[in-house]
Image: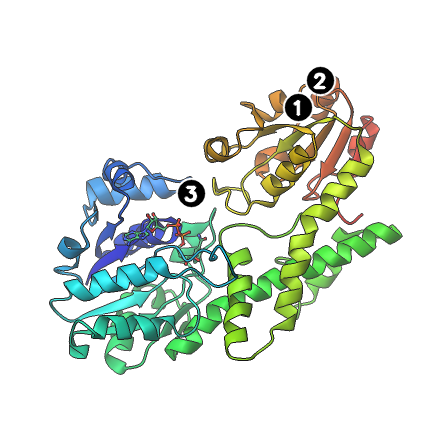
């Protein structure tokens, strides 16, 4: 099978490289020429563990992977064409902005010359794949294509492993021919006993939003419980641990922190609720989760402000929305740093991977080459992202270079008692 993948972001590029690893000839297409030029040289446009090696292998050794800006050229031999473009929130409301998806669908329609399966891998509201089918069938016979929904569940930071060893694959289709092709595509995973769920197209589209919204709900829930713990002197980490051991609950996504961020949860929660509204369904739980998450940054900033002096210099350790990625979209750490900066506090910062992305957008912060340098002469330290390299910082050394010994551990990665022995005022989350 030959594959064409449209959009070389986190999902498109990881899917492309992993499909090449399965043994498929894969061409990845993007309209961003600079991105394609550097990909042709093997340079991954973002930080993702293992990507550089996988790109190198399939560009230079197997030669199964190639890059192009031309969809028409790339579609000539393709048996499957994947749509992996972004679906951000629209500016004026909570709906998903589907303009990139519609644009690709139109282009695909113009270039279909032989039968192929169009795969919607972008996260799209229920009904979108049906609309894609309509757009394409306006310009080409329905016999020449099928549309299927195949939502992606990979996580940035562990994307390759997630793609190669997923908990499940979801395939929504409306006929046996396309379903069979999709099953064949994922046969390498099927051999590893990965469950492949065949559903209707609408069901597949909802599975993705329901999954992300449920995970966001777990985070929102434990964050509110952490507020109560803080108020009564209980420890949310112990609460999470004891809850998580219960197999009906599970321990993942049950860590209190500064609220969820990233390029998926915030927009998907909003879009899920907005889609439901169009069908007169009120997803009241999801609405509350969104509201609670939006209030989170303000709550945390109030807690910090209450415990530091005016005009303090604050060091932020971690800028990416989570560890092992350079993605800063909707990063809670950056939102908090921005809010404090707007209130007049000066911000020093360091992140192991996201400095370049952050420098382009947030010019008011002072950037340093290491956590230690970012902490020199500061009045407070905020651990915003739980990178592994922040888990064993030498706080004895840090205690000698800071101006005031205060630490706000938003991710609860330190033992407060140990830091207090070094003279730090320690503020964990929910304890
Ligand atoms: P991204 O913004 O990182 O990348 C999108 C790419 O598509 C960009 O490089 C852009 O130039 C390209 N593009 C846009 N229009 C194009 C066109 N007409 N032709 C060719 N290329 C075009 O996006 P992403 O983070 O990879 O997310 C893609 C989709 O996958 C979204 O719907 C997202 O919700 C979903 N998703 C993302 C993740 C994740 O962890 N990032 C996980 C699962 C699902």
Q: Quadrant of residue 96?
A: bottom left
Residue density around tag 3, few if under 14, some if 14–19, many if 20 or more, within 10 Å: many
Q: Does 176 sit left or right of 403 as displayed? A: left
Where residue 335 sits: x, y (%)?
A: 61, 42
The coloring applied to the image is: rainbow
Q: Distance between the residues labelled 2 and 1?
A: 7 Å
Position in image of residue 72 (x %, y %): 15, 56
Between the residue at mark 1 and the residue at mark 3, the CA separation in whole angstroms equals: 27 Å
Of the residues tagged 1 and 3, which is closer to the observer? 1
Residue identified by numbered label 3: 48
Residue that extends furthest to the front in the rendered view of this protein: 92
Is 153 on the left or on the right of 64, as rendered?
Answer: right
Does residue 375 appear anywhere in the picture?
yes
User: Disc 1 or 3, which lies upstream in sequence?
Assistant: 3
Q: Find residue 180 and report its horizontal and vertical position in percent.
A: 26, 76
Identify the mark at residue 401; answer none if there is no mark: 2
Identify the secondary structure beneath mark 2: helix
Q: Do the residues labelled 2 and 1 touch (CB within 8 Å)?
A: yes
Under tag 1, what secondary structure? loop
| Residue located beneath label 1 in the image | 375
Q: Nearer the viewer, residue 337 or 27?
A: 337
Looking at the picture, tell me which residue is in the foreground, 176 or 244.
Answer: 176
Q: Are marks 2 and 3 in contact (CB under 8 Å)?
A: no
């Amino acid at each position: 099978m030959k594959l064409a993948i449209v959009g070389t972001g986190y999902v498109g590029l990881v899917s492309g490289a992993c499909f090449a690893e399965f043994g498929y000839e894969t061409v990845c297409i993007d309209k961003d020429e600079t991105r394609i030029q550097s990909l042709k040289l093997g340079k991954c446009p973002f930080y993702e563990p293992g990507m550089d090696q996988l790109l190198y292998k399939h560009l230079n050794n197997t030669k199964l992977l190639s890059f192009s800006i031309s969809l028409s050229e790339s579609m000539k031999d393709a048996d499957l064409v994947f749509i992996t473009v972004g679906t951000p929130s629209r500016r004026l409301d909570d709906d998903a902005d589907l303009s990139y998806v519609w644009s690709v669908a139109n282009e695909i329609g113009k270039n279909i010359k032989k039968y192929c399966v169009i795969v919607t891998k972008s996260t799209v509201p229920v009904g979108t794949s049906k609309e894609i089918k309509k757009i394409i069938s306006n310009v080409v016979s329905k016999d020449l294509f099928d549309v299927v929904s195949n939502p992606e569940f990979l996580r940035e930071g562990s994307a390759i492993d997630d793609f190669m060893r997923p908990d499940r694959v979801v395939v929504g289709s409306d006929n046996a021919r396309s379903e069979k092709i999709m099953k064949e595509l994922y046969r390498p995973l099927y051999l590893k006993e990965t469950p492949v769920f065949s559903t209707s197209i609408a069901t597949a589209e909802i599975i993705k939003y329901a999954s992300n919204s449920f995970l966001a709900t777990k985070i929102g829930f434990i964050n509110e419980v952490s507020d109560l713990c803080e108020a009564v002197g209980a420890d949310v980490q112990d609460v999470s641990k004891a809850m998580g051991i219960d197999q009906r609950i599970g321990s993942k996504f049950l860590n209190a922190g500064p609220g969820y961020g990233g390029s998926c949860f915030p927009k998907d929660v909003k879009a899920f609720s907005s889609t439901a509204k169009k069908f007169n369904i009120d997803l009241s739980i999801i609405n509350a989760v969104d509201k609670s998450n939006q209030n989170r940054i303000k709550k945390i900033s109030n807690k910090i402000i209450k415990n530091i002096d005016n005009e303090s210099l604050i060091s932020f350790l971690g800028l990416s929305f989570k560890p092992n990625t350079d993605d800063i979209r909707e990063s809670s750490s950056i939102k908090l740093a921005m809010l404090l900066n707007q209130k007049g506090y000066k911000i020093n910062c360091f992140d192991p991977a996201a400095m370049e992305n952050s420098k382009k957008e947030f010019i008011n912060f002072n950037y340093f080459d290491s956590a230690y340098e970012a902490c020199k002469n500061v009045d407070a330290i905020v651990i915003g992202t739980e990178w592994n390299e922040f888990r064993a910082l030498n706080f004895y050394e840090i205690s000698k270079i800071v101006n005031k010994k205060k630490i706000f551990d938003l991710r609860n990665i330190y033992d407060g008692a140990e830091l207090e022995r070094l003279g730090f005022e320690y503020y964990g989350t929910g304890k």
